[in-house]
Image (tube, rainbow, N blue to C red):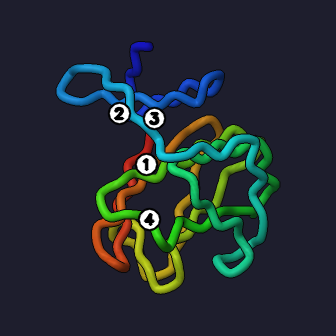
Amino acid sequence: PTPSTPIYIDTDTGDMYALIGGSVKKLAASSVGTALTATGTNQATALSVTAGLNLFGTVAAGTGAVLNTAQTFGVPQVLYNGGANQLSIYPPSGGKINNLATDAKIFLAINTAVAFWRATTAQWVGVLSA
């Protein structure tokens, strides 16, 4: 594949690629969650994702996911939204995504992906695909 975005997921195989220094690199996911269904309408009721690569196939309006509270520091956790609506993504309780408020969600558009790295016990850094 020739990704034009920093992160590319081949939805047929689940393989994940990154554009690093002008070169395409295949990334290994520790585990893959496929055909996931987003749940809940808030941080407490959203689906808790634990795989390294999480592929959502069903996303009803207003539903979401919560990042893994036990994610290893520096190891990416990727979410892909293949559903029909935007996906709400929450940090674990007490956490922050990028420079948002504590516990604030982000929205992941249809047919896009985001990679998160756990930087500290309460800080996640997210990079969106185009």
Instruction: Bin the neighbour count of mark 1 within 10 Å (Cα to Cα): few under 14, some 14-19, many 20 and up.
Output: many
Instruction: Bin the neighbour count of mark 4 within 10 Å (Cα to Cα): few under 14, some 14-19, many 20 and up.
Output: some
According to the picture, the residue beneath numbered tag 1 turns out to be 115
Whole-percent x, y for residue 2 in the image? 40, 14
Check the image and report above or below for 24 versus 57: above
Question: Which residue is painted at 18% across and 27% down in the image?
Answer: 21
Amino acid at pointer 3: Ala
According to the picture, the residue beneath numbered tag 4 turns out to be 71
Q: CA distance from mark 2 to mark 4?
A: 21 Å
Residue reaching furthest to the front: 30
Residue reaching furthest to the bottom: 94
According to the picture, the residue beneath numbered tag 2 turns out to be 6
User: Looking at the image, which is closer to me, 55 or 101?
Assistant: 55
Amino acid at pointer 2: Pro
Check the image and report above or below for 46 versus 61: below
Q: Earlier in the sequence, mark 1 or mark 2?
A: 2
Amino acid at pointer 1: Ala
Quick check: marks 2 and 4 in contact, CB under 8 Å? no
Give the left or right position of residue 61, taking residue 119 as reference.
Answer: right
Secondary element under disc 1, as helix, strand or loop, is strand
Q: CA distance from mark 1 to mark 4?
A: 12 Å
Question: Which residue is painted at 45% across and 35% down in the image?
Answer: 130
According to the picture, the residue beneath numbered tag 3 turns out to be 130
Instruction: Bin the neighbour count of mark 2 within 10 Å (Cα to Cα): few under 14, some 14-19, many 20 and up.
Output: some
Quick check: marks 4 and 3 in contact, CB under 8 Å? no
Residue reaching furthest to the left: 21
